[in-house]
Image: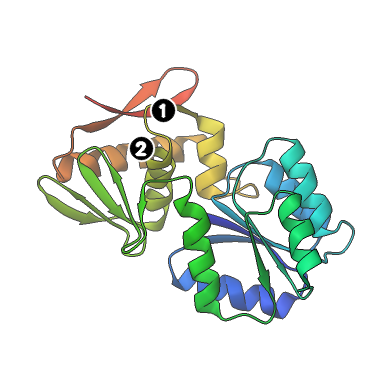
């Protein structure tokens, strides 16, 4: 799962990114509103953690603009402004949740799990995603199927989650490259083909009927054979 963390307090940003990485999340950090809007517009994130008071462009403006552009990724506003009216205004602009500083990291993890459950078949007790004959544990990066289980690398995990969140849908190569490697990466196009090959082998290893189909000139699609 890829998270955008927009927080101008660099010490807090680095600390949160380190903790989230430790939980298996891939984190892209930025420190002002203009950067947050640019990254958010790529529409490649599973969750955006958005500080309300950012330099150059306030978090509420970033939030409002992203919603106007139909970027529907779950967004959690993080701020020191904790009055009821502050919360209401943030939620009315399209935020999915509102977290007041200072907060406990475990609470942040719970909020992330909560907002992502709304758009996936996630088991709230075990953080599992199920699709046809496989079960995926993002926390353990473990894929289970009829013939057993296998552990995936971080990049394989991010790629698999992209397909599991949108089965039977064709995912463009450009979107997958951004999703897995990030908007600032200069990764070669052929790397995606390599990881698709790895992922196909993983699905075969666990005995799944799921396959990844190449859609020529567009991208790839997860489907049941």
Q: How many dots with numbers?
A: 2
Up-down: is 108 above or below 179? below
Instruction: Residue 52: tell me if it is visible.
Output: no
Q: Secondary structure at mark 2?
A: helix
Q: Is residue 119 left or right of residue 70?
A: left
State the residue at coordinates (87%, 56%).
57
Q: Which residue is mark 1?
A: 220
State the residue at coordinates (38%, 28%).
221
Q: Is residue 163 left or right of residue 99?
A: left
Give whichever of discs 1 and 2 has the lower sequence position. 2
Q: Is residue 147 left or right of residue 162?
A: left
Q: Are marks 1 and 2 in contact (CB under 8 Å)?
A: yes
Q: Residue 209 appears in which quarter of the rendering?
A: top left
Q: Position of residue 64 (x, y in %)?
A: 79, 46
Q: Position of residue 13 (x, y in %)?
A: 67, 73
Given residues 133 and 19, the one toward you in this image is: 133
Badge 1, how many Cα within 10 Å: few under 14, some, many 20+? many
Q: Residue 108 appears in which quarter of the rendering?
A: bottom right
Q: Position of residue 58 (x, y in %)?
A: 85, 59
Given residues 18 and 124, the one toward you in this image is: 124
Q: Position of residue 4 (x, y in %)?
A: 63, 57
Q: Secondary structure at mark 1?
A: strand
Q: Which residue is mark 2?
A: 196
Q: Is residue 162 left or right of residue 59?
A: left
Q: Which mark is residue 189?
A: none
- The quadrant of the rendering that contains the C terminus is top left
Badge 2, how many Cα within 10 Å: few under 14, some, many 20+? some
Up-down: is 150 above or below 84? above
Given residues 13 and 111, the one toward you in this image is: 111
Q: Residue furthest front?
A: 84
């Amino acid at each position: 799962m890829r998270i955008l963390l927009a927080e101008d307090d660099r010490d807090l940003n680095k600390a949160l990114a380190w903790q989230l990485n430790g939980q298996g999340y891939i984190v892209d950090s930025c420190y002002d509103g203009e950067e947050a809007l640019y990254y958010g517009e790529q529409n490649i994130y599973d969750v955006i953690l958005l500080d309300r008071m950012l330099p150059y462009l306030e978090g509420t403006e970033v939030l409002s603009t992203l919603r106007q552009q139909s970027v529907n990724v779950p967004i959690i506003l993080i701020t020191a402004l904790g009055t009821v009216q502050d919360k209401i205004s943030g939620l009315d602009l399209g935020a999915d949740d509102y977290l007041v500083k200072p907060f406990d990291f475990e609470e942040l993890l719970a909020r992330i799990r909560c907002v992502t459950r709304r758009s996936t078949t996630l088991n709230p007790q075990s953080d599992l995603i199920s699709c046809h004959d496989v079960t995926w544990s993002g926390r353990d990066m473990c894929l289970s199927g009829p013939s057993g289980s296998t552990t995936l690398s971080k990049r394989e995990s991010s790629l698999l989650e992209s397909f599991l969140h949108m089965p039977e849908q064709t995912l463009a190569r450009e979107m997958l490259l951004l999703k897995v490697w990030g908007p600032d990466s200069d990764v070669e196009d052929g790397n995606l083909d390599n990881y698709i090959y790895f992922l196909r082998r993983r699905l075969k290893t666990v005995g799944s009927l799921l396959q990844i189909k190449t859609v020529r000139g567009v991208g790839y699609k997860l489907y049941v054979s």
